[in-house]
């Protein structure tokens, strides 16, 4: 598989996910754009963003590569990360160099191959968010440019861990598949270990940009 320039630029580096849940006090595109600038100042090589409003606000203030996604709650499917080609194409139009989408093997509203083709036609790369080795293999066979371990722990059949899924990283490395490490990398040591275990680059979210979550880690630790 040819190595794309943007993936080469991210190799060995840190991507910071700047997302705020709907109930978060940080849920505002302006605030997300400031989090993104803080991440850039700290040395992030790329950003992972959710939603069209955040995409626009951040694209206006930085040239860092952006991995764009939507999170859409639908009645008819469990797939919530960029469930449709229309959303994926819109993210590319708003300037996402890479579009992330759920590539788990659960029932889905639109076929993966068609979604990948739509993203490529819009000029962006596909990051397939997977939860198992089998899903990684399937997504790459269908034309994904890279897979990310985002969904491990978020499908009922994947490992349910409070730590990163180190075993999945090992499996991906052993099969020679290109992958990104993402999910519960909560310390700098975790991020470095993920690279050492063969990740192309790492994505860190909560530990950097969800202060409510990090505060809870501390508060709960004090409760004994
Ligand atoms: C499962 C899911 O919806 N993950 C989302 C994907 O974009 C984000 O909520 C996570 O923050 C991101 O994957 C980074 O992971 P962590 O926040 O653990 O560093």
Image: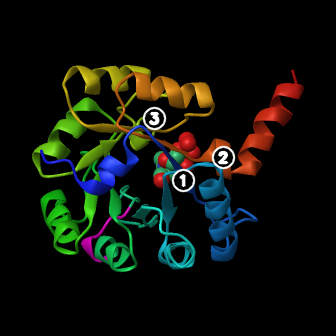
Whether label 2 touches label 1, CB < 8 Å:
yes
Mark 1 vs ligand 1: CB below 8 Å: yes
State yes or no: Cβ of the residue under disc 2 lies below 8 Å from any atom of ligand 1.
yes
**Helix, strand or loop: magenta stretch:** loop
Where does residue 209 sit, x and y in percent of width and height? 66, 52
Residue located at (55% from left, 35% from top): 184
Examine the structure image and report whether residue 88 is included in the region drawn in magenta.
no
Considering the image in quadrants, where does the C terminus appear?
A: top right
Numbered tag placed on residue 208 in the rendering: 2
Q: Mark 3 points at which residue?
A: 153
Tell me the element at label 1.
strand
Q: Residue 17 carries which label?
A: 1
Image: magenta residue range: 82-86
Whether residue 82 is situated above or below residue 138 in the rendered picture: below
Q: Between disc 2 and disc 3, whose residue precedes?
A: 3
Residue depicted at x 51% and y 27%: 192
Q: What residue is at 49 percent from the left and 51 percent from the top?
A: 45
Above or below 101: residue 12: above
Residue 21 in sight from this viewpoint: no
């Amino acid at each position: 598989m040819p190595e794309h320039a943007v993936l080469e630029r991210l190799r060995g580096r840190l991507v910071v996910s700047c997302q705020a849940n709907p109930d978060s006090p940080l849920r505002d595109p302006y605030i997300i754009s400031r989090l993104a600038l803080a991440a850039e100042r700290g040395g992030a090589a790329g950003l992972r963003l959710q939603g069209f409003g955040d995409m626009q606000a951040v694209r206006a203030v930085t040239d860092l590569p952006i991995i764009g996604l939507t999170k859409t709650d639908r009645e008819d499917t469990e797939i919530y990360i960029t469930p449709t080609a229309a959303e994926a194409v819109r993210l590319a139009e708003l300037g996402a160099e890479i579009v992330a989408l759920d590539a788990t093997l659960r029932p889905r509203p639109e076929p993966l191959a068609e979604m990948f083709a739509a993203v490529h036609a819009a000029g962006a790369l596909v990051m397939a968010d997977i939860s198992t080795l089998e899903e990684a293999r399937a997504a790459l066979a269908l034309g994904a440019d890279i897979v990310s371990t985002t969904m491990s722990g978020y499908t009922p059949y994947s490992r349910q861990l409070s730590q990163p899924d180190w075993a999945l990283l090992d499996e991906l490395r052993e099969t020679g598949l290109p992958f990104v490490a993402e999910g519960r990398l909560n310390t700098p040591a975790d991020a470095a270990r993920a690279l050492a275990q063969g990740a192309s680059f790492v994505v860190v979210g909560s530990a950097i940009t969800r202060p409510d979550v990090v505060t809870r880690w501390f508060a709960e630790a004090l409760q004994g």
